[in-house]
Amino acid sequence: MKKSIAICPGSFDPPTHGHINIIERSLRLFEKVIVAVAFNTSKSGLFSPDERVEMLKALFKNQKNVVIDSFEGLLVDYARKNNAGAILRGLRTVPDYEYELQMSLANKMMAPDIETVFMMTESAYSHISSSLIKEIVRFGGSVKGMIHPLVEKRLKEKMKKV
């Protein structure tokens, strides 16, 4: 029997409409998608991993086959622990592909049984990144259509404190 669980890892700091779009579209391919917020020691996030998990749970509260979790350590170890047969990665640009290709080749060497599936971001979201969203909000610009209103509210509250 083929595994139909995919892990969709990321920092999601904050989650964007592009992230949501990739996760929702992946449900056509996988029975279950585990959205895994990474504890990334090389990045200092605006939101804590727990805050990101909380936002994602709110965004996907009506999706029974989307599980929100967090992890630390090697992604392939996390994927094995959750019986996932695939790692799902969204791509926006050529630099995204170059970075993700390197990661997928390393993961394949460590876990030959786990496939990496690349999904192109829909054009409406290809310009959106979490970094861009934070920059726009920092300078008082509108992020309407780029992030969910719940995320926008949380982001503006967080930016007031920074």
Image (cartoon, rainbow, N blue to C red):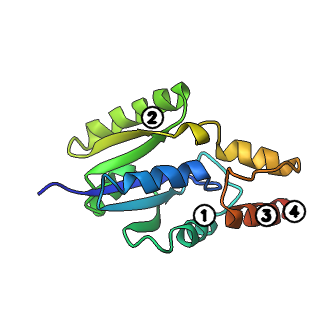
**Mark 1 or 4, nearer chain start:** 1
Residue drawn at (88%, 51%), measured in percent from left and top?
Answer: 140
How many numbered discs sit on the rendered protein?
A: 4
Question: Distance between the Cα atoms at labels 2 and 4?
Answer: 33 Å
Res 149 quadrant in image: bottom right
**Mark 3 or 1, nearer chain start:** 1
Quadrant assignment for the N terminus: bottom left
Q: Which residue is mark 3?
A: 158
Above or below: residue 121 compared with residue 159:
above
The percent coordinates of residue 156 (x first, y second) are: 81, 61
Q: Which residue is mark 4?
A: 160
Q: Which residue is mark 1?
A: 52
84 lies left or right of 12: left
Amino acid type shown at disc 4 = Lys
Label 1 element class: helix
Amino acid type shown at disc 2 = Glu
Question: Distance between the Cα atoms at labels 3 and 1?
Answer: 12 Å
Q: Nearer the viewer, residue 2 or 110?
A: 2
Answer yes or no: is residue 80 visible: yes
Amino acid type shown at disc 3 = Lys
The percent coordinates of residue 27 (x first, y second) are: 36, 57
Q: Which residue is mark 2?
A: 100
